[in-house]
Image (cartoon, helix red, strand yellow):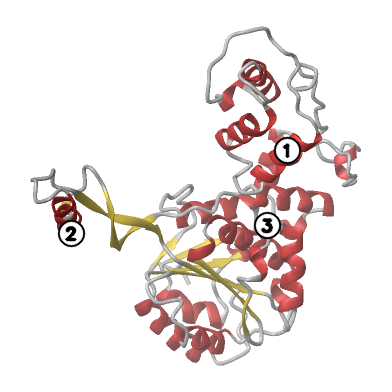
Amino acid sequence: MLRAAGVPADHQRTRNFLAALAHLDAAVARDVYWAGRLTLCAGPGDLPRYDRCFAAYFSASLRTARRVRGTTVSVTRPVAAPYGTGGPETTGEPGAPPATASEIEVLRHRDVARMSEAERREVHRLLALLRGTRQARRSRRYRPSPHGPAYDRRRTIREILRDGGEPARPRRRARRQRPHRVVLVVDVSGSMAAYADTLLRFAHALVRAEPRATEVFSAGTRLTRITGALRHHDPDLAMDECSAAIPDWSGGTRLGEEVRALLRLPDPRGAIVVIASDGWERGPADLLGAQMARLSRLARRVVWVNPHKGDPAYRPLTAGIRAALPYVTDFVAGHSLGACEDLAALLAGRRADPRGAVRRGGADA
């Protein structure tokens, strides 16, 4: 479209555009707009044409960074048929059009264990676009700030000495803002086989959003750190690296021993700890309860994600869940795309859907 409008978006400029998007968030309209404007346009004369094409190709609701009036450029886009109507998207063909908004809304609340392969691929595509940002916290370090609450004495004195003793305007400072650290433990045992891949892709979105403030472990017969494998930008490549790094995929679960191994590391101290498991414990339940009690004292928050909690008839009756729930801050579901979005909202400090969350001490066992 840009070339037809007269913008010289040649092969090299297109490669630069894709390289810029690799370092940004393709789900944010402002990032896409400025990445294209700085790489696809050759001069000031291309900017009005680029703005018109961007506004026409995407929707008016995306609100481009500049509001430009001009000739209208029309775009013809295919519309996907609903699932189950025999359209190409149900077969998972490479050239199939993306799902419509109504289809995505249906998939958002569907259990991933009951999805077809094409529906599961669409959910994984949407998880790759999930923004895993989280609530910020005040760190101990300071940064220069013109309107900060505290005076920066050292910087003020340095400027006075630099000016030969002349009085200088007092400099101010404020505390830096850092995201809360998150430690995510994903159960990859046989009972979690239907959900482990989706939860690992959710973990990939968290690592991609905050790579320095996220640690991910797999839990089976042993605790395995997989954060490095999830730092690949491509989700499929990250999943392949996880498969190679996890030695106990689809095995048993010893959650008590794994939580004890986690407590020997400095990672959970002061962090938000998220345990994604159905609670089927092969070891003694009292060991899991004792280690969860220690974890609740060291962690900032303990969130337990159970895929089976999405079923209205579910009751936490297994020994592992009953032992862990008294020390859990939030007990949430993790069976669908919507549940993953609610979990991301919880980690970001905003409750998207408070229904179904169980606070500490309020488990209806």
State the residue at coordinates (77%, 68%): 240
Tell me the residue at 72%/53% (across/down).
Answer: 124
Asked if the residue at tag 2 contacts the one at tag 3, i.e. Cβ–Cβ closer than 8 Å, the answer is no
Tell which circle, 3 or 2, labels the residue nearer the N-terminal end. Answer: 2
Q: Amino acid at mark 2?
A: Arg
- Local packing at callout 1 (Cα closer than 10 Å; few below 14, some 14-19, many 20+) is some
Q: Which structural element holds mark 1?
A: helix
165 on left or right of 218: left
Give the alpha-carbon distance from disc 3 to disc 2, as whole Å. 41 Å
- Residue at numbered disc 2: 154
User: Is residue 100 shown above or below 158?
Assistant: above
Mark earlier in primary sequence (2, 1): 1
Q: Can you identify the residue that label 1 sits on?
A: 103
Q: Quadrant of the N terminus?
A: top right
Residue furthest to the top: 71
Mark 1 or mark 3: whose residue is earlier in sequence: 1
Which image quadrant for residue 111?
A: bottom right
Residue farthest along the front direction in this orientation: 164
How far from the left and from the top, in percent, is residue 99? Answer: 76, 37
Q: Which mark is residue 91?
A: none
Amino acid tagged 1: Glu
Residue 345 placed where, x, y %? 48, 51
Contact check, label 1 and label 3, Cβ < 8 Å: no
Measured in 3D between alpha carbons, the distance from the residue under mark 2 to the one under mark 1, in whole angstroms, is 59 Å
Whether residue 312 appears in this view of the structure is no
* Three-letter code for the amino acid on which mark 3 is drawn: His
Residue placed under numbered mark 3 in the picture: 233
Which residue appears at 49% of the width and 56% of the height?
356
Which of the two discs, 3 and 2, sits closer to the camera?
2
Which residue is pictured at 43% across the width and 88% down the height?
290
Q: Secondary structure beneath disc 3?
A: loop
